[in-house]
Image (cartoon, rainbow, N blue to C red):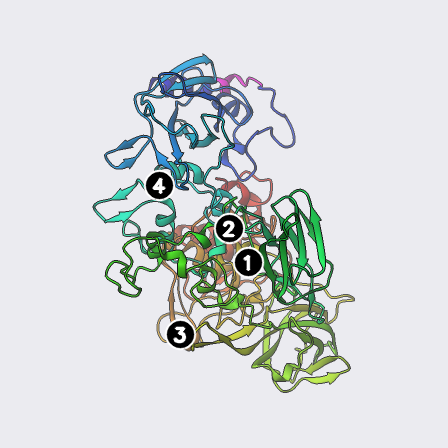
Amino acid sequence: MKNRLFWGLIATLMLLVGISTGASAAGEPDRAGFTAADSEYYMTDELFFWYQPGLVFEIIDYEIPADLQPLVTFTIKDPGGRPLDIDGILTPGEVGPRFYISYIPVGEEQRVNYNVGSRGPTADSGGVYTTIEMGTYTYKYGNALPADYETDATHTIAGAARRDLRDFGLDRYSSNDWVDFVPSGASEPMPRDVVQTATCNRCHDPLAMHGGRYQEVTLCEQCHNPGMYSEEYDLSYSFDVMIHRVHANLEPQLGDIEYPAPLNDCSTCHTGGIPTADMPLVANPNPAEACNANGLSMTEIFWGDSGIEVHINSADGKLFAAASAPGSAETGQWVKDGMVFVLVDSATGEVIQEVPVDNTVLGCATNPPGTYRGTAGAQWDHYTSRPSREVCGSCHANIDFENGVGHFPQTNDDMCATCHVPFTGTEYDASVTGAHTVEYKSKQLPGVLLEFVSVVDTGPQMRPTVTFNVSDKFGPVNPNTMGRLRFSLSGPNDDFDFYVQEDALGKARAAGTSWTYTFTTKLPADASGSFTVGAEGRTPETLETAGPETISHNDQMQNPTLAFAVTDDEADARRLVVDDAKCENCHTNLSLHGENRHNADTYCQTCHMPGATDADVRLEGTDESIHFKYMIHKLHMGAELENGYVVYGYRSSVHDFSHVEFPGDLRNCESCHDGDTYEIPLPAGVLPTNSPSTPITLMPPITASCLSCHDSYDAAAHADANTSANLGESCSTCHGEGKTYSVERVHAR
């Protein structure tokens, strides 16, 4: 309390006397560690200098002395490198580190925490801090290691520090660090590294648990290892078991969770693409894009072993690469679907591993779905080769291994890997990768790629003719043999208020090696500027499994679009507002409306226009807007909305998004937006949103963007009061770029 009053008084005096801090007087402020997306960026120079917000915690030395009580030397600084007082006297905000020490027993792979409390593994307690100088300290653990501790085992000393500046109107700041080592020095440490924090942060933005103190997977695992078990729930809280259970919406201590991606797509978290100890040969990308209708792709082959050769299709096949050290080599555009790369020991000729490369057309026309994202852990492939009852049962909760319900009886994990091998090359079999085959990723699918060549007859009151090509990963395809083929017209590209979709199946006409389709609908008489043509389609396929069953699946195209000029001299595409690649960070494969629509860059907006509502399918209540920007803000805001969001969909199905919890930070507009497209003012020509269910039923463009999240009546009144019937919205006066209450600033974290 005294520290808070002292530093508050100092800050007040600094403001009164206007002391200069040496920070920039003009232009961009000097805010080390912070950007315009952080609220600290907007502090005055004086307050920023005195409070020194933020925290960087670093372990700089360690030892295990004769008394076996580890000694850690660490620093605490602000992001600009200035030292901090751990007690919060000489600099504001007390800093509270917590220290852990764990090891991985020789021959095992899971961490064991040396300190165990009443609830399981925990931080060290009773230790002593010593000041070396301000910002540099030592911590002497209060608990000693066992006299017979494993000196040849990989150990981890980890710390999670937190600095609390909430009393000064700021935030709590956390920083994690750790060091891996083998006490005897007999070998290099081999820490557990299955999933990296960077991969979690694709959605969680950032991972921050237990009050935000714990932000790294390594810190989570200090407690969340096999030693953490809940007697109350009769459940393991080991990290691997717990995370599967949480994402599968089976965790009893949490509310409902709707995982935004296919749950059986293990690579969402276990992102790969690099060699590992168990899998020294990989191809990345795999599948590789075959976009030229010739059945050939290109990829890069990586190997992690030394003294190897890589051959094609067999151990004595064509030599692709030979190396004395780990490395990689790109192929040319000559990789056929299913081509096998074989890793061979140069000295013995022994086959070490075989890797088939599959081709795909996903990514040829739009953003590729389901690719490796984030950062791969050194042991990312462990999920394929370490099946266990606890880990598998954390998702497959309908299985009772002990009593043989849903599976042969298993009293231990000894036999799991006998049937559930990592990889066989057969989909939908008992192998780990085969059993988790994601349908749209199946190598059995040929794919559907439509590419626009041109659009002619594009003037007002004309019927456009599109020329296009269709292919799969093997070569050209006759579009009239597909199961669905539809073309759409939308415009103008300033903002859409015209949309028509036509069924083109069986109506395409050959034009040399290409195909054409002529719309029956004319462009509007008042059409101007540029318009957009889009496509969707699919081919019905049957997927073979390892058993007698088959799976019916519609192989979908990825919705290409093409802008064309109506009255413009050159085609002007609709502005890019959101980045579909960012959608895939969480969704991995954004796929809606019977999996017919995927492209959030340019296609979804063609139908979800400013005037669109659910009126055609709604059975009761007031019609709801389904304008793309309004709808996407609403459904991601979900549970944070004051008035909820319920829309009717296909066949009058009801979709209530009022319970959705966004896994990231809703203030981070760039989670979805392309660059600064969330800033105002908006471009000329952007249309108002038709919103029958809200106090303002015809929302001006900026108002619609804001009220889609800030849906209170007070917010609506504020927007309405600052909109003139004659002159329009005045939002940019206060909320424009660079203004005191700019969109970027009021959303700063």
Q: Nearer the viewer, mark 3 or mark 2?
A: 3
Element type at mark 1: helix
Which kind of residue does numbered mark 2 sit on?
Asn
Residue 686 location in percent, x, y? 60, 60
- On screen, residue 424 above or below 33: below
Stretch of the chain drawn in magenta: 14-20
Could you tell which of marks 3 and 1 lies nearer the N-terminus? 3
258 inside magenta stretch:
no
Which kind of residue does numbered mark 4 sit on?
His
Which kind of residue does numbered mark 3 sit on?
Arg
* Residue named by callout 2: 722
Q: Are marks 3 and 1 in contact (CB under 8 Å)?
A: no
Which residue is pictured at 41% across the width and 61% down the height? 694
Residue 555 location in percent, x, y? 55, 73
Q: Residues within 10 Å of mark 4 (few under 14, many from 20)?
A: many
Residue 688 visible to an observer of this rendering: yes
Q: Nearer the viewer, mark 2 or mark 4?
A: 4
Check residue 166 in the rendering and tell me which mark sits there, or answer none.
none
Instruction: Give 184 or 19, whichever is nearer the viewer.
Output: 184
Element type at mark 4: loop
Could you tell which of marks 3 and 2 lies nearer the N-terminus? 3
Residue 724 visible to an observer of this rendering: no
Element type at mark 2: loop
* Residue named by callout 1: 701
* Residue named by callout 4: 224
Question: In the picture provided, is 588 more to the left or to the right than 68?
Answer: right
Which residue is pictured at 60% across the width and 79% down the height? 485
